[in-house]
Image (cartoon, rainbow, N blue to C red):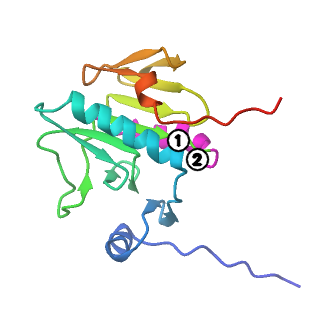
Amino acid sequence: MVIATAEAKTYTAEEYLALEVESEIRNEYRNGEIIPMTGGTPNHNKLASALTALLWFALRQKPYDVFVTDQRLWIPEQDIYTYPDVMVTPQPGELKLGRKDTVINPILLAEVLSPSTAQYDRADKFAAYRTISTVQEYLLIAQDKPQVEQFIKQGENEWLFMDHQGLDAVFRVRSLSVDIALGDLYEAIEFEKNSD
């Protein structure tokens, strides 16, 4: 007896974009698949909002736009559409040709790590982000402890990694000349207590 397996439906980018306009939830597009973006935890949302606020205040009256969660990004070399947790672009921003809702020229990208997405954010998503010529910096923000992993572009195929830990740590977003204190970033976060 042969058991038939159902193939996953694939979509063109145009089909995805048409469906996304009508969708009540955000979806990522990868290799013809539409992948629903799951809702974040309160800590996830607090951290994305805190980083957005810190960057927005630091960059006021400077030629940058700061976006949080709902701004779609197109990664042309991979034909991926995604929604970074935080994204900074220069002004004026560049949009995908024929679209009014899809950015193509970020300088800084940041993701708040979740157990279900941490591996993807560190590996495949970062590899895709690195194909965008304008990206200069990538931040990975932990939810379970005060830690920011920072990747700074040094040259073609060369990235400097810096690990910032503890509420007293301060790091510089070099692409924007902005200092971020982890104490400020994690101010509203309540970490789970270990029962050991």
Vertical order, 43 against 185 (above or below):
below
Vertical order, 13 against 88 (above or below):
below
Name the secondary structure under disc 2.
loop
- Residue at 25% across, 19% down: 177
Q: In what quadrant of the picture does the N terminus appear? A: bottom right
Q: Position of residue 196 (x, y in %)?
A: 83, 29
Give the residues in magenta. 115-134
From the viewer's side, name the closer residue of 83 and 129: 83
From the viewer's side, name the closer residue of 50 and 13: 50
Amino acid type, label 2: Thr
Amino acid type, label 1: Asp
Which residue is labeled 2 in the image? 117
- Residue at 12% across, 30% down: 62
The quadrant in which residue 147 appears is top right
Question: In the image as oriented, which residue stretches furthest toward the right?
Answer: 1
Which residue is labeled 1 in the image? 121
Number of residue marks: 2
Disc 2 residue crowd, few under 14, some 14–19, many 20+, Cα 10 Å = few
Q: Position of residue 153 (x, y in %)?
A: 36, 23
From the viewer's side, name the closer residue of 30 and 101: 101
Q: Position of residue 89 (x, y in %)?
A: 23, 39
Q: Position of residue 170 (x, y in %)?
A: 41, 15
